[in-house]
Image (cartoon, rainbow, N blue to C red):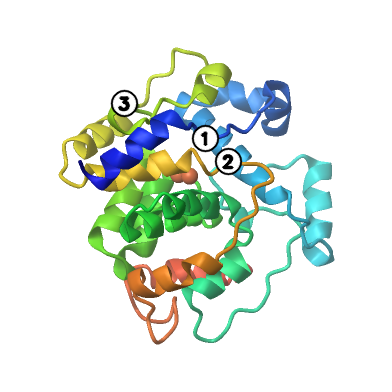
Amino acid sequence: MTVCAEIAEEDTVQQPPEMKVDRRTFLSAVGVGAIGAMSHEDRAEELEHYMIHRLDDSVPPAADGEEAALLELYEAQEVRAPRGTGSLFMPNGREFEPMPAKPTLEDFFRLRFNPATHVLQSATHALETDQPESTIIACLLHDVVLNLIKVDHGWWGAQLVEPYVDEKVSWGIRYHAPLRFYPDDTVGYEYPEMYNRIFGEDYVPEPYIREAAEFAQSHRWYMEARMITVNDTYGFQEGMQVSLDPFIDIIGRNFKQPKEGLGYDNSASAHMWRTIANPNRPL
Ligand SMILES: [Fe+2]
Ligand SMILES: [Fe+2]
């Protein structure tokens, strides 16, 4: 029996605690009109982002300054950023702490991704159930790109980390996004009940998502992506405290930290790290 199969058996016995999402609260947060105009994929994305934000919002935000004033102005004008805008680029009153000259992944977690509750909870579940380090690091990184951009986040997220991780890790991150819409009994991954309740039973993923999922399902690395979706369901636990500390050594072994600092190593995704480091740059 493989490690994944063993984990799957356990997972089918103990299902993750599910975050309670009130339909009306969700609809009013997003806007009923906006929901009505969304495709099914957009609604599913919106729900996941809403849940991730609710987890992070339990930590008191740093408010004040120019951003807070801008936020008030935006709210008064009812201006909405496009839904695919990354969290760091939303007007939310947050001040950006200065980054070190040669930032590490840990610096990004503490100064930009913080509190990163969802990915830390997902990775904590992978760690506590003795899953391989490749899965743990993939879970830790699988949604951090949402700080930059939310549209097609599996693809963007894979590109962000591709130069620094094992090929299977970035592959898994790319395909976790389409695969989460497709159940897999062999590992105890069910279609999220939340999607049925909020979006109805008639949801059919767009062809490009279905095709990507089918490609992944027949690929020899399928489980790299599938286990991210399994651990993903353990990443929405209100009140569960998590920390980056248990992952420092795992990051050291599985993430090739460039000596020049992330963003300054001329890799294929260095510009993405610089953008995350400097959201206030005008051009
Ligand atoms: Fe995701
Ligand atoms: Fe996730």
Which residue carries the number 3 mark? 185
Residue 282 visible in the picture: no
Q: Which mark is residue 236?
A: 2
- Residue placed most toward the observer, 107 or 40: 107
Residue at 61% over, 39% down:
51
- Residue placed most toward the observer, 184 or 35: 184
Work out how far the residue at label 2 is from the one at label 1, CA to CA, in angstroms.
Answer: 9 Å
Work out how far the residue at label 3 is from the one at label 1, CA to CA, in angstroms.
Answer: 15 Å
Local secondary structure at mark 1: loop
Picture quadrant where residue 112 is located: bottom right
Q: Between tags 2 and 1, which lies in front?
A: 1
Of pointers 2 and 1, the one earlier in the residue sequence: 1
Q: Position of residue 204 (x, y in %)?
A: 38, 19
The three-letter code of the residue at mark 2 reads Phe
Marks 2 and 1: CB-CB under 8 Å?
Answer: yes
The three-letter code of the residue at mark 1 reads Pro
Picture quadrant where residue 8 is located: top left
Local secondary structure at mark 2: loop
Q: Quadrant of ligand 1?
A: top left
Mark 1 residue crowding within 10 angstroms, few (<14) / some (14–19) / many (20+): some
Which residue carries the number 1 mark? 16
The three-letter code of the residue at mark 3 reads Asp
Work out how far the residue at label 3 is from the one at label 2, CA to CA, in angstroms.
Answer: 21 Å
- In which quadrant is the C terminus drawn? bottom right
Q: Is residue 177 left or right of residue 167?
A: right
